[in-house]
Amino acid sequence: MISVSEALHYIVIVSAIYFFIITVINIRFIEYLIDPNKKWIDEPFNDSVSVLVPARNEEDGISDCLRALSIQTYDPIEILILDDRSTDRTAEIIKSFADSDPRIKMISGSEPPEGWLGKHWACDQLFQEANGDLLLFMDADTILSEGTVAASVHESNIRKADLLTVMPQRIATCITERLMFPFLDWIVFSGMPMAYAHRSSNQYLSAAFGQFMLFRREAYKRTGGHAEIRSNPLDDFTLGRITKKLGLTWVLYQGTESVQTLGYKGDIEAFRGISRSVFPAINYRVSVFILFSVILTSLSFLPLATLVASVLLNQQSTELLVLSTMSLGMIIISWAIVCRKFKHSVLAILFYPLSVAVIIVLAWHSFITYTFGVADWKNRRILGQKIRL
């Protein structure tokens, strides 16, 4: 009869093989949003674009965001920035850009009604003011390369996309981010078969990123928009799932050459910011959370523990050593590919067990704060979440 240890080793090798194969295949099946080999920059465009940016206490990054938007060459375009009752210099900075660029307009946001999360209410207010055929939702800490809007409209038209989104390049500024960002890119890039995901109608085979979501207006209205998910903190992934559920066309690109997202303001804010998305990402399901914790812990630590025990105690069987060596090798290779592709430090490969340890602690923090109703973000409580078995 197989032992628990052997069973875990077999689960780990199967998981490692899966992540390794998906990583290698995805190298071919995720395209860069901006491709220098494509000659699209001078083509005429007919669709009008509304860039929609909610901003709450973003004085540290909003200037970079607006400066990047002001050099976009796409036309016709309007850039709507909503000041979500900021208490810092955010409104002042937005106004200075609006005064010098007629395409930029500042909107003063109102307090969210009961049952609404602040960002979702801000996005809904932006939508009500938008005139574009295409709606580009962005975060205020996002920086676009020149030509990104034009490239996204071109690709959206070619692929007939109802929602085009990108995996951005994440700029790490603290230890928590340097540990977390490689894992976040790895779990998406190495966990989701991109080619199949683009063909499949399975809503959970999707990923959307709030830093850059380009909707066709009618598609956004069909999803119900942010009003439909007014109390769900995971707005980007949830809107992506609704898009696929409705049979609309979802397209994911790699945005490391076109979309950058700035880091949080220190380790504590980074921890809390990522924490608010983890438990919602698994739909508040306790069983999935426990399974996720067990598999991720085993995948990251069991091969290492087996090899270390073999060296120090010489007590492991040859079969388990082979399984552990193969598992560890495939995990390291998949991490190396992701770190290279998304421009993370090569040192992240060596510290991946520490990254996983932090994400597990962070996941438990997310689970506990939502279970006891104390999750919050930017001084606003996140309420109304239903915990499921």
Image (cartoon, rainbow, N blue to C red):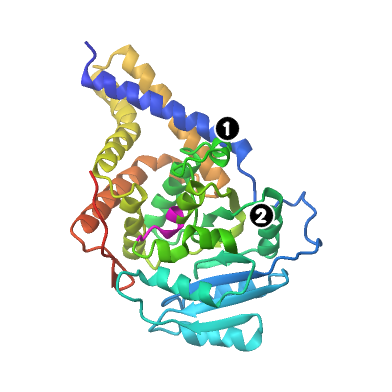
Coordinates of residue 311 in the picture (x, y in percent): 30, 22
- Relative depth, front residue between 52 and 162: 162
Q: Which residues are magenta?
A: 232-238
Report the residue at 59% width, 64% height from top: 217
- Relative depth, front residue between 77 and 223: 223
Report the residue at 22% width, 58% height from top: 369
Kind of residue at disc 1: Ile
Tell me the quarter of the image containing the N terminus.
top left
Q: How many discs appear?
A: 2
Coordinates of residue 233 in the picture (x, y in percent): 36, 61
Q: In screen coordinates, is 223 left or right of 277?
A: right
Report the residue at 28% width, 13% height from top: 317
Residue 375 in view of the camera: yes
**Image height check: is 29 above or below 66?**
above
Q: In screen coordinates, is 198 left or right of 388?
A: right
**Image height check: is 223 above or below 109?**
above
Q: Residue 380 lies in what quarter of the image? A: bottom left
Coordinates of residue 3 in the picture (x, y in percent): 22, 17
Q: Residues within 10 Å of mark 1 (few under 14, many from 20)?
A: some
Report the residue at 54% width, 55% height from top: 169
Q: Which residue is mark 2?
A: 156
Query: Is residue 185 magenta-colored?
Result: no
Q: Residues within 10 Å of mark 2 (few under 14, many from 20)?
A: many
Q: Which residue is mark 1?
A: 25
| Badge nearest the viewer, 1 or 2 | 2
Q: In screen coordinates, is 255 left or right of 362?
A: right
Tell me the quarter of the image containing the C terminus.
top left
Measure the alpha-carbon separation of dots 1 and 2: 23 Å
Kind of residue at disc 2: Ser
Q: In screen coordinates, is 277 left or right of 182?
A: left
Question: Which residue occupies the extreme top position in the image?
Answer: 1
Mark 1 lies on a secondary structure that is helix
